[in-house]
Image (cartoon, rainbow, N blue to C red):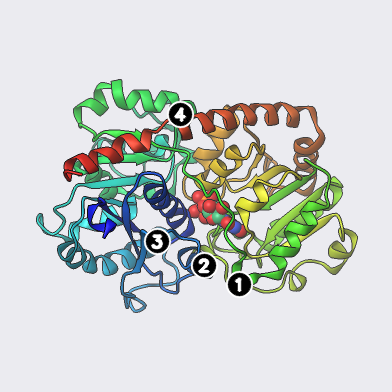
């Protein structure tokens, strides 16, 4: 059939909505717009999250996109509950990747595209186990990629804790990065395996574009440091974000109610509050947020989760799980007083549908890379609330570019207080600075659209066709 004549690309994704979402979107684009046949290899998490299952089982996936679950790895004995997200991912991915070489041997494959976490586990392979051209889809910023390339150098220069040496890290050709913004996984050198593998790949696809990160992208092409490594070709193919609403999760009535509630609100009047797939707040912070939202008097949609004290990424592997009803942890008075003004959604919202809705005025976000791209694509100004991973780097970029405002944790405080929250929420909806940020975001919305239409993915993808003689 037709399939035989199409080039075949394998996309390999580690668990987590922040990876699966953009990789699946990339796969769809290759199939729908560029005429490829794609096998999407999904790695089941310890317990596959409902949100991930929903995304990968969607009946709307195009026929030439085949989602294949790698067999579930039995790793529960190796996993400990105190492990961070990164360590847990590594264990799960390494186990599942044993099934990759047989798959590649049994199928004719023109290119393999994977995320950095899977790539880090490629050290389990011998040289000829993966003989197809391998590309990485780096699902975060060019800045984080630059830092990743720089880590082996930093590792040689600094013994022990980087933060003891200087208060910023200077990646050649890039803006200095304050040490306080760096992720723990960088500081304790857990990501070095990614750094060491990256120069060996055939190319790196980046979910960004020239106008969003001009300095860093230029430095990849011009700075001697990057030319000497040398780094593989970098292709800024972004923004790759969800474009079509998925059918509601398990015909979820709460999601349907949410959208019909939004339909009744004035345009540009609602703040959407969400901390990504994993984010959880302490009980104290949850209360301050509730109070701040209430006293702002503004309309809101809050994707709430039961408070968790120890771990800000408490929900990472359970995205979309049924969790405790917000009634059990939010004060009854709050819910009565905000009835009709605010909507509390438990655990998971159809974010793309919300952000594209004309009633949305702002997005209080944990600054995950996908969330901020989605916000820009729909022209929504942000309130930056970084929590873990590279989110502090992302938040700083947004502030510097005038795309977000950041609430401050007061001197000597552990949490952002209600009055600060009240202030930024009001400001983003009706303040003058909010208007400025909105018009700035809309400039970037246009720039995102131009970048999306400029065919940079087609350029690299066409190489795979040429190489395979198609
Ligand atoms: N997401 C969603 N509903 C939610 C929370 C998240 O649809 O309630 C989606 C969001 O649209 C984004 C992805 O999950 O595409 C989260 O990726 P991001 O990089 O923003 O953050 P992460 O979850 O990896 O921290």
Dot in front, 3 or 4: 3
- Quadrant in the rendering for residue 463: top left
Residue named by callout 4: 213
- Quadrant for the C terminus, please: top left
Question: As displayed, is residue 43 above or below residue 192?
Answer: below
Q: CA distance from mark 4 to mark 2?
A: 32 Å
Answer whether labels 1 and 2 touch (C-beta < 8 Å). yes
Q: Earlier in the sequence, mark 1 or mark 2?
A: 2
Q: Earlier in the sequence, mark 4 or mark 2?
A: 2
Q: Earlier in the sequence, mark 1 or mark 3?
A: 3
Disc 4 or disc 2, which is closer to the eye? Answer: 2
| Measured Cα–Cα span from mark 1 to mark 2 | 8 Å
Residue 187 visible somewhere in the drawing: no
Number of marks present in the image shown: 4
Residue hosting label 1: 250
Nearer to the camera, 270 or 144: 270
Q: Is residue 31 above or below residue 440?
A: below
C-alpha gap between disc 3 and disc 4: 35 Å
Front position in the image: 457 or 470: 470
Q: Nearer the viewer, mark 1 or mark 3?
A: 3
Whether pointer 3 and pointer 2 mark residues with C-beta atoms closer than 8 Å, the reply is no
User: Which residue position is annotated with label 3?
Assistant: 63
Q: Could you tell which of marks 3 and 4 lies nearer the N-terminus?
A: 3
Secondary structure beneath dot 2 equals helix
């Amino acid at each position: 059939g037709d399939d035989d004549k199409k080039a075949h690309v394998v996309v390999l994704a580690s668990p987590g909505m922040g990876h699966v979402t953009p990789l699946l979107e990339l796969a769809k684009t290759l199939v729908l717009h560029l005429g490829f046949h794609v096998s999407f290899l999904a790695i089941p998490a310890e317990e596959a999250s409902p949100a991930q299952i929903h995304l990968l089982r969607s009946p709307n996936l195009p026929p030439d996109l085949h989602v294949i679950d790698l067999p579930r790895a039995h790793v529960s004995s190796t996993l400990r509950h105190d492990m961070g997200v990164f360590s847990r991912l590594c264990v799960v991915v390494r186990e599942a990747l044993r099934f990759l070489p047989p798959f590649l041997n049994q199928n004719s494959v023109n290119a393999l595209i994977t995320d950095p976490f899977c790539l880090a586990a490629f050290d389990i392979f011998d040289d000829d186990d993966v003989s197809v051209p391998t590309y990485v889809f780096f699902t975060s910023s060019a800045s984080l990629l630059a830092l990743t390339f720089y880590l082996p150098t930093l590792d040689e220069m600094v013994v022990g804790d980087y933060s003891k040496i200087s208060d910023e890290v200077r990646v050649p050709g890039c803006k200095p990065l304050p040490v306080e913004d760096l992720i723990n996984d960088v500081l304790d050198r857990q990501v070095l395996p990614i750094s060491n593998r990256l120069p060996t790949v055939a190319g790196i696809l980046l979910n960004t574009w020239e106008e969003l990160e001009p300095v860093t992208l230029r430095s990849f092409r011009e700075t001697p440091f990057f030319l000497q490594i040398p780094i593989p070709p970098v292709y800024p193919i972004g923004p790759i974000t969800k474009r079509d609403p998925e059918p509601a999760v398990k015909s979820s009535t709460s999601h349907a109610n949410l959208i019909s509630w939004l339909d009744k609100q004035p345009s540009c009047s609602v703040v959407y509050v969400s901390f990504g797939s994993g984010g959880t707040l302490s009980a104290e912070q949850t209360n301050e947020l509730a109070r701040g939202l209430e006293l702002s008097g503004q309309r809101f949609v809050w994707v709430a989760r039961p408070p968790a004290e120890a771990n800000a990424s408490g929900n990472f592997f359970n995205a979309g799980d049924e969790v405790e009803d917000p009634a059990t942890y939010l004060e009854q008075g709050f819910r009565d007083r905000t009835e009709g003004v605010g909507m509390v959604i438990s655990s998971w919202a159809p974010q793309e549908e919300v952000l594209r809705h004309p009633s949305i005025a702002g997005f209080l976000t944990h600054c995950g890379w996908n969330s901020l791209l989605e916000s820009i694509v729909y022209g929504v100004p942000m309130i930056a609330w970084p929590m873990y991973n590279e989110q502090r780097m992302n938040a700083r970029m947004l502030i510097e570019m005038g795309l977000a405002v950041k609430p401050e944790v007061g001197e000597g405080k552990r949490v952002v207080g209600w009055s600060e929250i009240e202030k930024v929420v009001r400001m983003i909806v009706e303040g003058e600075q909010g208007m400025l940020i909105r018009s700035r975001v809309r400039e970037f919305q246009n720039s995102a659209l131009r970048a999306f239409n400029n065919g940079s993915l087609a350029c690299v993808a066409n190489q795979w066709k040429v190489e395979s003689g198609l």
